[in-house]
Structure formats: C-alpha cells, structure tokens
Amino acid sequence: LGTSFNVKAYADDVEFETTLESGEVVVLKTDNAIQTEICKMVPGEHFVIDETTNKYSLNAEDPSKYVSWKEGKLVFKEDRIEKVAELLSRWYNVDIVLKDTELSDLTYTATFVDESLSQVLDMLEAISPISCVVSERYKQADGTFSKKEISIYTKKGN
C-alpha cells in the first residue's frame, strides 16, 4: 500500500519476516481460500511468524538492521551467533557450522561493509573467544564443487 518494505522468506527457514520502512503493510492469513487480517504494520515495525507454530510477533524496531543489505551492509545488533552464522552463510555462500554448545551465549553488534569473508572471520575471532577453521572447496563426484565450510569452535582457556 504505497510501501517500502523488506521480506525475508527462505524455503529452508521456519520463520518468515517483514520489516516496514514506509507506507503500510497488511499481513493476511489464508486458510481454505478465506483471508483473515493478522495485523496492519506501520513504519518501523518488524513482523515475524513461525510456520511450525503459527505464532507471530510484531515489534517496533529500527528497520536499518533488516534493510541495510540493499546498501551492501551486514548489520548485527545484539544478535546471537546462530543468527550471525545464518546471515554470513547466505551473504558469502558458505556453510557455517557451530561446533560447541558454549557458543550459543555469544551475541554480536557490528556493521560490515565490503569486508571479505576472511576479514569478517578475523574480526570475529579478535573480539570474541572463538576460533574459525575454513575447509576449502572440493570437487564432488558429479563434477561440481562443494561450498566452503567454516567450523566455529570455542577457544579453550577463555
């Protein structure tokens, strides 16, 4: 409805998100061809729905965190390492595997602009008790190449 907004909906995710910058968004639920309005969003709101539970949240948030990718920026604001790994995986087309349960306590606030994957990993290692191991791509049986895999571990002794 005369709107600037962002939608995050990947086939392998259970959560779908919409962030409204300007205008208005109406979120509808369709069930047996009947549409029901869930909510009307106003600028500065972030909507998340979990497909498995059908539970949703609508919160006032700074939209720049969710739309900065359009300007080539990755923005994290108190994001858990799982979210950081998910976004880095998609941004750099790599697989990131968190190897230790202790990692789940880590949160990050950072903005990355034009940094390479190795620069981002170096910065994350410098500011937190993690170690990143990069496995190079390899040729698969069908002749294609695998994605790089980044394994993230907790630095022992920290």
Image (spheres, grey):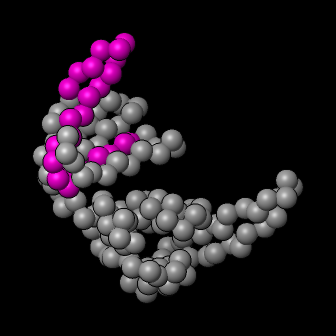
- Is residue 22 rendered magenta in the image? yes
**Which residue is at the front of the view, 100 or 25?**
25
Main secondary structure found in the magenta portion = strand
Instruction: Give residue 85's position: percent from left, percent from top.
Output: 47, 64
- Residue at 60% x, 69% y: name it: 150
Give the residue at the far front of this rendering: 2
Residue 15 visible in the shown view: yes
Query: Which image quadrant is residue 58 in?
Result: top left
In the image, taking residue 10 as reference, residue 138 lies left or right, namely: right
At x 73% / y 61%, what residue is drawn? 146
Residue 117, position as x, y percentages in the image = 53, 77
**In the rendered view, would you say 6 is above or below 27?**
below
Specify start and end residues of the magenta stretch as a single range.
15-37
The number of callouts visible is 0
Q: Quadrant of residue 61?
A: bottom left
**Horizontal relation, residue 46 to residue 92: left or right:** left
Q: Position of residue 88 (x, y in %)?
A: 48, 66
Q: Quadrant of the N terminus?
A: top left
- Left or right of 27? Residue 12 is right
Residue 69 point in image, percent of width and height: 37, 65
Q: State the residue in front, 119 or 22.
A: 22
In this view of the protein, which residue sits in the foreground, 150 or 87? 87
Residue at image location 79% in from the left, 59% down from the top: 144
Residue 125 visible in image = no
Residue drawn 31% across and 38% down? 49
- For the C terminus, the quadrant is bottom left
* In the depicted structure, whether residue 23 falls above or below residue 68: above
Residue 40 colored magenta?
A: no
146 horizontally vs 126: left or right: right
Rendered position, 122 above or below 90: below
